[in-house]
Image (cartoon, grey):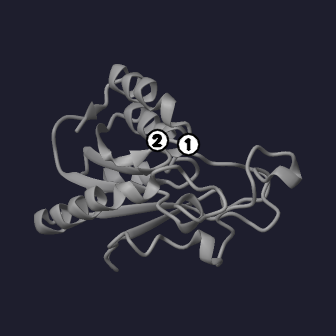
Amino acid sequence: MGTGPNALLLVDVQNDFCEGGSLAVPGSDEIFPAINQWISKAQDAGWPIFASRDWHTVDHVSFQDRGGPWPVHCVQDTHGAEFHPKMELPDSAIRVSKGTAFDTDAYSAFDGTQLDNFLRRHGIHRLFVAGLALDVCVRATVKDALKLGFEVELICDGTRAVEADEAPAVLEQLKQEGADLC
């Protein structure tokens, strides 16, 4: 798509994915200084800020009691689904809800959200991406963004993996697919 306006995309920085949550990512508390620095940078530069979130129904297909791989997490309108209070998300941030249907899971912020259309309508070409978890929803989001023709800069200090020992391989994979690591 070429170099052009930027946006910050924060992936699933929700209570259930942070320390103490039902599906906590190890080391998740370590991402907040970087994320908040990037939020401040984006605000100073006038970039739009997007925050994706899992927003699951009570009986979501991804839950173990329905045969899915995950414990119950990020159920709509619960504390676990709220953005983590350590993330200094401005009121002006655009919330992107995914995984909202009973029988469909969504890992990428682009999956069923029309986010790509919104970004294109607003002339955004480059995304700076951070959030949780590197080896699940962040990877899916970055891969989709690249496939859709966006330039991606992955904020390494602003993400952590469920499987920490997999993080270097995931970062290398995303770099090979075209993401820049910053």
Disc 2 element: helix
In whole angstroms, how far apart are the C-alphas of marks 1 and 2? 7 Å
Coordinates of residue 32 in the picture (x, y in percent): 34, 61
Between 132 and 31, the one nearer to me in the picture: 31
Circle 2 is placed at which residue position?
Answer: 134
Secondary structure of the residue carrying numbered label 1: loop
Q: Where 7 falls versus 175 (above or below)?
A: below
Q: Position of residue 4 (x, y in %)?
A: 16, 45
Q: In which quarter of the image is the C terminus?
A: top left
Whether residue 20 sits left or right of residue 85 in the image: it is: right
Crowding around mark 1 (Cα neighbors within 10 Å: few <14, some 14 to 19, many 20+) is: some
- Give x and y (percent) for residue 47: 20, 61
Q: Looking at the image, which residue is at 75% across and 55% down?
A: 71
Residue displayed at 72% across by 59% down? 101
Query: Can residue 143 be seen at all in this image of the molecule?
Result: yes
Q: Foreground: 77 or 125?
A: 77
Whether label 1 touches label 2, CB < 8 Å: yes
Name which of mark 1 and mark 2 comes first in the sequence: 2
Q: What residue type is labelled 1?
A: Val
Q: Name the residue under label 1.
A: 162
